[in-house]
Amino acid sequence: MKKLPTLSLSGTLYVASDIHLGPSIPLTNQAFFDFLKKASQEADVLFLLGDVFNAWFGDDLADYSDEPWLRDSINAIAECAQQIPTYFIHGNRDFLVGKKLAKQLNLHILPEQIIVHSDAGHLFMSHGDELCTHDKGYMLMRHLFRWKKLQQLFLRLPLKWRYKIAEYLRNQSKKKHRQKDKLYHQQYDINPTSLEELIRTNPDIDYVIHGHTHKEAIHVINSTDLESGKIRYRYVLSDWDIDHTPQHQGFLIINANGLNFQRLTR
């Protein structure tokens, strides 16, 4: 694993991921819009760490879709990003968000892994799926879907074909998810070996922050720096779902006082 790109920022950072915006979750969509308004008023910088959209199969979707949820989502994100710098890292559901949409939304697209130098320390940020290396099948598909030539071919297909392909892949993913037992979900979390390699290559990291697994938690990373005794922490972001029970949502606030999970109060 190579040294990672860096970004230096000060002030209050808000971080969220895995909102999965879509047509069938109006309460979740609205909660996220409320969060964006809150972020624009209270934060200095916003980070969206992937899977903001439940599916994104080409930037022309924003041009040809007249669905209210999508129009409202685009307007809400763009309005927030006009107020404060808003950074985006691709997730496994919205890795086809491109430069055109980023410009429309005023987003700054970051590499899939980055170290942010903040008032709270050195933060590693990513969506997190690239660290789930136990799941060999997923990693193979991930590598295939991130292949630029394949993406170019896919984006040349008519929009309705892309929609059907994306819908099929989502259904297959749901079927696989239902078939796996509890042991599977424990085993195919972030791979500790990949995490240790990340820390070994980038020893300045104080905190690892990611989404993807939908398992909000704070973990002590079992990889201490023997010389300094440095202890690191891994913050796993919540996914968002207000339309089903149990409801869950949340975001991370980072500033000179440290890192703190918050719930959106409505």
Image: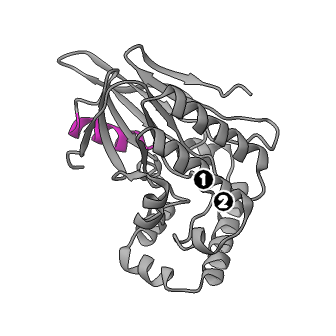
Dot label at residue 71: 2
User: How far apart are the two marked residues, 2 and 1, measured between alpha carbons?
Assistant: 6 Å
Amino acid carrying mark 1 in the image: Asn
Q: Residues within 10 Å of mark 1 (few under 14, many from 20)?
A: some
- Closest to the observer, 110 or 195: 110
Q: What secondary structure is marked by label 1?
A: helix
Could you tell me residue 71's position as x and y percent? 66, 59
- Closest to the observer, 218 or 119: 119
Residue at left offset 40%, top offset 20%: 255
Horizontal side of 211 relative to 115 (left or right) equals: right
Given contact means CB atoms under 8 Å apart, are the residues at marks 2 and 1 in contact? Answer: yes
Amino acid carrying mark 2 in the image: Arg
Magenta range is 190-202
Reading the image, the residue beneath label 1 is 75
- Give residue 13's quadrant in the image: top left
Q: What secondary structure is marked by label 2?
A: helix
Residue at left offset 40%, top offset 64%: 99
| Colour scheme shown | one colour
Q: Residues within 10 Å of mark 2 (few under 14, many from 20)?
A: few
Residue at left offset 29%, top offset 38%: 115
Residue at left offset 66%, top offset 35%: 249
Does the segment drawn in magenta span residue 140?
Answer: no
- Closest to the observer, 237 or 53: 53
Could you tell me residue 160's position as x and y percent? 66, 82
Could you tell me residue 265's position as x and y percent? 70, 25
Dot label at residue 208: none
- Return the residue found at the far left: 227
